[in-house]
Amino acid sequence: MSVALVWFRRDLRLQDNPALQAALDAGHDVVPVYIHAPHEEGEWVPGAASDAWRHRSLAALDADLRVRGSSLVLRSGDSLPALQLLVEQTGAEVVYWNRKYEPATQPRDATIKRTLREQGIDAQSCNGSLLFEPWDIATQQGQPYKVFTPYWRNVLSHWRLPVLQDAPEALTAHTVDSLALDTLQLSPTLDWDAGFWEHWQPGEAGALEALSVFEDGALRGYREQRDLPDRVGTSRMSPHLHFGEIAPWRIAHALEDLRSAGTGADIDGYLRQLGWRDFAYHLLHHFPKTPTDNLNPRFDRFPWATPSAAQLHDWQRGNTGVPIVDAGLRELWHTGYMHNRVRMIVASYLCKHLRAHWLHGARWFWDTLVDADLANNTMGWQWVAGTGADAAPYFRVFNPVTQAEKFDPQARYISRWVPELAALPVKARFAPWQHPLLLAEHAPGYPRTPLVDLAAGRDAALAAYRQSGAG
């Protein structure tokens, strides 16, 4: 029987795995492989929170493979030599993998594919993570989209979900040696991630459980509740999607099976969010410099402020004196996650009120989010900053107080993550600096005033915008 290597990367599942299925359909015995090569990710080496999740997801994948008679072969180092050595050790005739789309890994993978083929080893790549790949959708002029709504209309005109594939019941055993997972040093030694696992179960089983919980709960009312951070009103699927523990089309199939007059609008709203995820990869592929460069070059002249180390530290640790901002950043620190609406508020405060360059925030999110994803992170920060595709105009400045009053009207989210404010009357929790006596009595350790006065910060941002001529 011929042997194939299946190179797992960010597709850590057995169901709906096109690379694995292609190898099995071709009749090969499969050797599952994961190569730890963070140095090949360019400037965006995976962050600490992401690595903590990856450790547990790889362990879950290996356990799932062992149930089926196989196991995950772990290697570390440069990917091409590692694959070449594995080909030599196993006699593999072909290497299969699912594509990645980041600026550093796309050319790497192209080089690996070309080199293996030149050496007589077949190499095949598949789409294992997107509903539509970045080059599948284009304008009538053959150009990439920069605005989501026309992109989404085009997607819907081509909508067709892949057929679902069950995980294989059994796989052929192999005797290939593997590194121990702990040698990859993905899991933190000081257990600062302990709070994460009160909220998350990495791995394919965890992804399927999260989907089931969403179907039974937050799906109904999703369009209205997805912006309310005091409840589970979202799917919480983002880290599972990022690590490829579930295919987006499996989620879409599951939701379509629940479509009715009562659920249709909520299902459409969620599918649109999957569309935003594809759109982020569309942008990253066609504009590969955007993880560090403004998509809109007019903002290259914008006079960003230089925040002090103390200001950045206070923002990062949720000590800005603005409760909704602090709540979001403390949620992130404790759980590796932040509610999407709050991400926008937190980002706006950094980019607009503090006028710090969006890269300061993008890099912090990259290190601390378990769902840190280069395409989504880049699009999100440039959207809020006003520098990117489909961007909120720079002069749209989120007021964190009115945002909190609208989306956390009982201050439950604020009270959960900034508990020192819980003793204040609800109205005082949104802007406690306006109630100095209450603040001094009930929360003497909380900042007396915000890092920057909200009105002054907004005015300075708008003045800088006018000065730059970016509009």
Image (cartoon, rainbow, N blue to C red):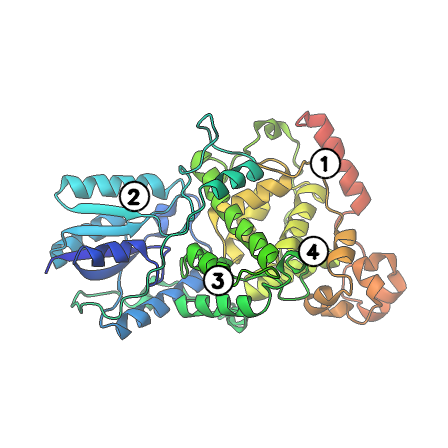
In the rendering, which numbered label is found on residue 325? 4
| Left or right of 277 in this view: 68 | left
Disc sitting over residue 173 in the figure: none
Tell me where residue 80 appears, x and y as whole percent: 23, 47
Residue 322 picture location, percent across and down? 75, 56
Foreground disc of the pair 2, 4? 2
Type of residue at label 2? Asp
Question: Which badge, 4 or 1, comes first in the chain's sequence?
Answer: 4
- Asked whether the viewer can see residue 49, the reply is no
Q: Is residue 246 above or below residue 361?
A: below
Marks 3/4: CA–CA distance = 38 Å
Q: Give the residue at x 66% y 32%.
A: 303
What kind of residue is marked 3?
A: Asp
Q: Is residue 205 left or right of residue 376?
A: left
Residue at image mark 1? 395
- Estimate the spatial distance between the alpha carbons at disc 2 and disc 4, rounded to whole Å: 40 Å
Quarter in which the N terminus is drawn? bottom left
Mark 2 touches mark 1? (CB < 8 Å)? no
Which of labels 1 and 3 is toward the front? 3
Q: Which of 168 and 172 is in front in this view?
A: 168
Q: Which residue is drawn at the image coordinates 77% and 67% (left, top)?
A: 421
Q: Is residue 280 visible?
A: yes
Q: Earlier in the sequence, mark 2 or mark 4?
A: 2
- Give yes or no for contact between labels 1 and 3 (Cβ–Cβ under 8 Å): no
Residue type for callout 4? Val
Q: Mark 2 points at which residue?
A: 109
Observer-nearest residue: 79 or 150? 150
Q: Are marks 2 and 4 in contact (CB under 8 Å)?
A: no
Q: Name the residue under label 3.
A: 257
Which of discs 2 and 3 lies nearer the camera? The answer is 3
- Give the mark nearest the N terminus, 2 or 3: 2
